Image: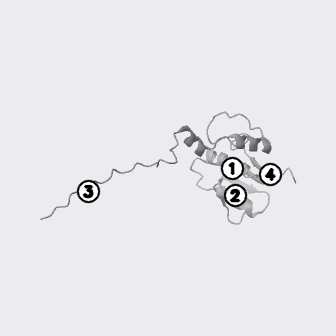
Amino acid sequence: MADTPHITIAHHPQASVVAAPSHDHHVTDHLLRRVGFEPVPDSRLYTLCEPERDPVRRTQLAVQSLRAARQSVSADAAYDLQPGEPLPSPLGSEKQPPHTPVPSAQRRAQAALAISPARAQTAAGARPSPTQPAYRTTPAATPHPARTR
């Protein structure tokens, strides 16, 4: 039973796109509803809501979202972009170098040697003298001569 997918998604002649969970589970029900499927009354099937609104693209996104939620999904070829491939980066097609794990001791040593951004700004600018105030004082008010009658 390990080879049985959690959810099977296929085209149905009357209902457009349908999803069939392999077992009744509240998490599967919740996930299918979140990606745009609604349950068919008196059935274990789910149909895609608003099937006239670009069903192929929406089903492709649903398949990818269900896989991102750690569900094994079997889908028709039209809905399966790249079986087993991870989701593309939301930042676009920028190639980033592969992440290499750094030991925690090395990260702590780098953090200890780095200058914090707050201190970097004060080190770059001139620091005010401790005896001189950092603000500008207003000129002393000149006393006006008292006018008498």
Q: CA distance from mark 3 to mark 2?
A: 78 Å
Tell me the amino acid under the disc marked 1: Ser
Mark sitting on residue 5: 4
In the picture, measured across the screen, residue 146 lies left or right of residue 33, that is: left
Q: Nearer the viewer, residue 121 or 104?
A: 121
* Residue 41: x %, y % from top left: 68, 65
Q: CA distance from mark 1 to mark 4?
A: 15 Å
Tell me the amino acid under the disc marked 4: Pro
Q: Residues within 10 Å of mark 3 (few under 14, many from 20)?
A: few
Instruction: Give the residue at x 16% y 61%.
Output: 147
Q: CA distance from mark 3 to mark 1?
A: 77 Å
| Mark 3 or 4, nearer chain start | 4
Please give the residue where the numbered disc 3 appears in the rendered image. Answer: 143
* Residue 145: x %, y % from top left: 20, 58
Please give the residue where the numbered disc 1 appears in the rendered image. Answer: 65
Quarter of the figure with the N terminus: bottom right
Q: Nearer the viewer, residue 132 or 124?
A: 132
Q: Provide the secondary structure element on which disc 4 rests.
A: loop
Q: Provide the secondary structure element on which disc 1 rests.
A: helix
Instruction: Give the residue at x 68% y 50%.
Output: 65
Q: Nearer the viewer, residue 1 or 17?
A: 1
Q: Residues within 10 Å of mark 4 (few under 14, many from 20)?
A: some
Q: Residues within 10 Å of mark 2 (few under 14, many from 20)?
A: some
Q: Are marks 2 and 1 in contact (CB under 8 Å)?
A: yes
